Image (spheres, rainbow, N blue to C red):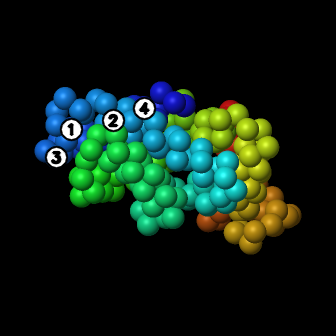
Amino acid sequence: MLDQLTQLVQQFGEQAIVKNQQVPDELNDAVKKEAGNGILEALSGIANSGQANILTDFLKGNGTQKDHPLLNIVQQQVGAKLGNQFSMDNQTVEGITKDLIPNVLGQLVGNAKNPNVKGFELQDLVGMITKGDSKTQGSILSQLGTSLLDQNGDGKLDLNDAMSALSSSGKEKSKSGGLGALLGKFFGK
């Protein structure tokens, strides 16, 4: 999963960093590497500091929530790190983080939730973020599992959710892809 994060930072860093005239060419690779490390550190800090609900809420979405509080936290932390390490002014740092962070995290979450994208699994993403802390990882996955299986959005799992997931017609079926696809994605199959 770390490789996928690095690839996304490389991909989106092309626009946010390499084509940014405020970043000297000789620093492009170092800035991208530090931005990737900073993203992971910020996410891990959020997950392991009692703010896992913010992370879980972001992961429940489809990765397109551009004004989510998690993005603001990560942007601030990565921005501070880049500003300090590379002596960048606030405007340059803000330009990089506002372009890079939402795109990288949005794509990361979108890929992890897409069963057609190989090598991106939600539980692997959570494992990377929690750095193997099984208690935090279990808590986040449990919250995500409940939200993924809650077909009618009422916040609880019950017979209505099971019937919606098994139904061969209806909006819930087309939204979820059925119980088998849902459980297969959740458990990495």
Comes first in the chain, label 3 or label 2:
3
Q: Amino acid at mark 4?
A: Thr
Q: CA distance from mark 3 to mark 2?
A: 14 Å
Residue 130 higher or lower than 164, as above or below: above
Q: Amino acid at mark 3?
A: Gln
- Residue 78 in percent (x, y) is at 42, 48
- Quarter of the image where one finds residue 155: bottom right
Q: Residue under label 4, please give it.
A: 6
Residue 64 visible, this orientation? no
| 146 horizontally vs 92: left or right | right
Secondary element under disc 3, as helix, strand or loop, is: loop
Q: Quadrant of the C terminus?
A: top right
Comes first in the chain, label 4 or label 2:
4
Mark 3 and mark 2 residues within 8 Å of each other at the beta carbon:
no
Q: Amino acid at mark 2?
A: Lys
- The residue under the point 86% across, 64% down is 159
Residue closest to the far bottom: 154
Q: Nearer the viewer, mark 3 or mark 1?
A: 3
Q: Residue under label 3, please give it.
A: 22
| 54 horizontally vs 82: left or right | right
Mark 4 and mark 2 residues within 8 Å of each other at the beta carbon:
no
Nearest the eye: 133 or 111 = 133
Comes first in the chain, label 3 or label 4:
4
Nearest the eye: 178 or 12 = 12
Q: Nearer the viewer, mark 3 or mark 2?
A: 3
Residue closest to the far right: 159
